Image: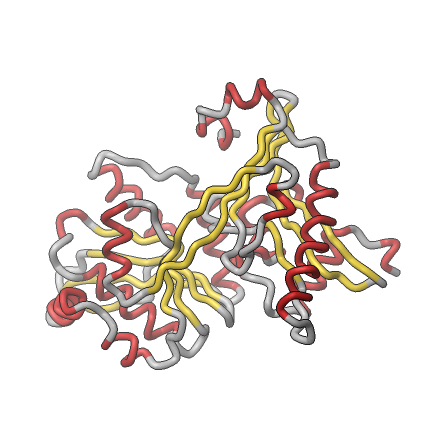
Amino acid sequence: MLINQTNKERFCKLCNENKSIPLFMQSWWMDAVCNYKDWDVLIYEKNNKILGVLVFYYVKKLGFRIILQPQLTQFNGIWINNSNNLSENEKISFKKEVMTGLVNQLEKLKFSYYDQNFHHSITNWLPFFWKRFEQTTRYTYQILDISNSDSCFQQFRASKKSHINKAKKTIKISFEVSGEEFYNHLQQNLNTSGHRVHYSKELFLRIFEASKSRNQGCVISAIDEQMNLHAALFIVWDENCAYNLISTINPKFRSSGASSLVFWEAIKQMSTKSKLFDFEGSMNKNIEESFREFGTIQVPYFRIRKFNSVCFRLLYHSRKWLYSK
């Protein structure tokens, strides 16, 4: 009976039944990035049919209730169970109804701060605007159809093609790098460049093991004849989209073309598993330009925020404070 099921239990069942729910909102993904107890879902329904959900990660700090975007998760938030039988005008009304119902439930949670990225399919955030939420537009970069990888290659800029062809002469692709090795390689490369990994090995390995056990994640690496690891990607996917979740490159081999080669290999591998490839975007100028050279299109998505606490607004400047245990 529905009356004996929690929202989370009903949502987990929905995820198993509805393949249109994006990967980063799936219950198994939220379990991996948040732990089971640290996420929840709001449900808007009529006649026992779920019309929309709002999936969220929450933490409590010093008496503040905070809803945040989980680490290594491009988006979650709103998903709407769209109907193809509606006119365009009816779809707008339907989405407005669902989002209004969800935002009204959200407000009742009495959060101090709310910060989520929505999936790019959410193009109307007016119900949140009317409740005095704020919006910032962010961008990701996608290849919309990877079913023909050779056709994708033809859309690459000449410089990318040249890098890939150069790398092929001396570098081999491997799928044997473990999650532990990948994280250590990433950490070493960032340390060499004066940076650090902003998420724990424990978190990464939870995601790695969860996705690999479902055949929805793998590491693709580029290795030379001396067994030097030049570059690697950790990608995750469902049948709708493959995501470049994490990439790493050894600064000593930046000019080898290995980084371009592993992206090309990822697109080829995913062409039989998923419909499109998401480079996971970046607001960094150099990374953005590099992703565009793969023949991608720019896809906007919304970051939605709201402060309900003046005290918390004063603490917000410290991101370390937000994510520290």
**Front one among 157 and 174:** 157
Q: Is residue 138 left or right of residue 8?
A: left
Q: Is residue 299 left or right of residue 193?
A: right
Query: Residue 56 is drawn in which quadrant?
Result: top right
Whether 82 is drawn above or below 11: the answer is: below
Whether 126 is drawn above or below 308: the answer is: below
Query: Residue 306 is drawn in which quadrant?
Result: top right
Residue 23 % position (x, y): 54, 60
Looking at the picture, the colour scheme in use is: secondary structure
Residue drawn at point x = 27 percent, y = 80 percent: 150
**Front one among 50 and 101:** 101
**Front one among 276 and 169:** 276
**Front one among 238 and 121:** 121
**Which quarter of the rendering shows the N terminus?**
bottom right
Q: Is residue 179 left or right of residue 228?
A: right
Residue drawn at point x = 12 percent, y = 59 percent: 256
Residue drawn at point x = 56 percent, y = 22 percent: 312
Residue 319 % position (x, y): 45, 29
Number of numbered labels in the structure image? 0
Residue 295 % position (x, y): 28, 67
Residue drawn at point x = 65 percent, y = 22 percent: 63
- In the picture as drawn, the residue positioned furthest to the front comes out as 89
Residue 33 % position (x, y): 53, 47
